[in-house]
Image: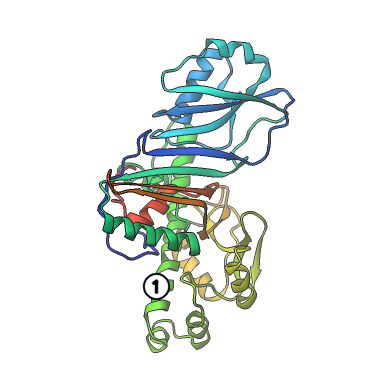
Amino acid sequence: MYLRANTHSKIDVYFSKNSNDFVVREIPLYEFSGSGEHLILHIQKKDLSTNELLKDLSAATGVKARDFGYAGLKDKQGLTFQYISMPKKYEKELANFSHEKCKIIDTFLHNNKLKIGHLKGNSFFIRLKKVNKIDALKIEQVFNNIKENGFPNYFGYQRFGKNNDNAKTGLEILKNELSFKNNKLNNFLISAFQSELFNTYLSKRIEISRFSNDFSKQELLALYKDKTLVDNLKKQKQFFKLFDNEIYEHYPYGKVFNENLEEGLKRFLARDISPSGIILGAKPKLNEGFLGEIENNIYKDYFDLLKTQNGSRRYLWTYTSNEKLNYNEELAQLSLEFSLQKGSYATVVLDEIIHLERNEEI
């Protein structure tokens, strides 16, 4: 169980990831050029995964699956808007495409095929039901706190499967105890295991941050045995605590680098940088000192298993933007709107607010 930054009691409201109450819109990384050999389709779909959509588009147009491009996979549940690229020469065959669960709402010409990551972020609309006035005030308070201070950038719990066993299966694949004919599935399950390791490290950082806020200097010194470390933790006013010379990334995108605590804290509070955690793979760059020990304790058994996988670093702490909240007391419904950088999960924000049941597929 990963620790939340917000520790209030569960808020008992109703949420369903359906097309009326959960809407996702891609925010393109750049404007499309208006010319080129690729056709960009702006597609609205509901209760249909991206892979299911591409399969149906391929059947109707004759475009091979590998020739489609997309910036990110979108949820099957809910109403989603995303961009798909295909070779322009197949444009006439789009007349054969008709689908009860999706429609093409616009097209653009572009000179490049869309690739994973060609995305600025996503905007979200979430409707909560059975919300009484007191709970609406609680939700508003936590939502404003997240707006002001950010939230832990966990991988979303849906990534780990309905039975929460994707990461376990990924580890079995790495150990050659199991394999599927579908290499994409194998890779996805391995990435779920990498994601679980990242979440474990982030949860440990949340624990340290909580302890630093709640414990006295004497209690922290008994726990961590380092006076300078404890002094550095206690002098920080923000919730998520930073460490001297830890590894950061420029925010919202940029290079990985080390920074001293004084400068790192100043830039973190300005949202110029964010501390990062490992997506374990080949040639990992670890922190030194106290954080290096924590990373090693979490990752030490898996360095060899993951040495052939792609590795990277990921923001530990991130932010919402374009926030809106609306409460209808008569209908007992509350809606939240916000945008996130690519790779961050709306359900993690929602979990921080109302505390979702994590054993459910959401």
Q: 336 or 300, which is in the foreground?
A: 336
Position in image of residue 136 (x %, y %): 32, 55
Residue 152 visible (yes or no): yes
State left or right for residue 92 relative to residue 169.
right
Residue 150 visible (yes or no): no
Position in image of residue 346 (x %, y %): 44, 48
Q: Tag 1, which secondary structure?
A: helix
Q: Residue at x 41, y 63 (%)?
A: 203
**Which residue bears the numbered disc 1?**
210
Quadrant in which residue 39 is drawn: top right
Quadrant in which residue 2 is drawn: bottom left
Q: Is residue 351 above or below residue 260?
A: above
Q: 107 or 356, which is in the foreground?
A: 107
Position in image of residue 234 (x %, y %): 47, 82
Q: Quadrant of the C terminus?
A: top left
State left or right for residue 24 relative to residue 358.
right
Q: Residue at x 38, y 62 (%)?
A: 141
Q: Quadrant of the N terminus?
A: bottom left
Q: Is residue 1 above or below residue 184?
A: below
Q: Disc 1 residue type?
A: Arg
Q: Is residue 237 above or below residue 170?
A: below
Q: Residue at x 51, y 82 (%)?
A: 235
What colour scheme was applied to this rendering of the protein?
rainbow
Q: Residue at x 46, y 43 (%)?
A: 124
Q: How many marks?
A: 1
Query: Label 1: few (<14), some or many (≥20) within 10 Å?
Result: some
Q: 200 or 358, which is in the foreground?
A: 358
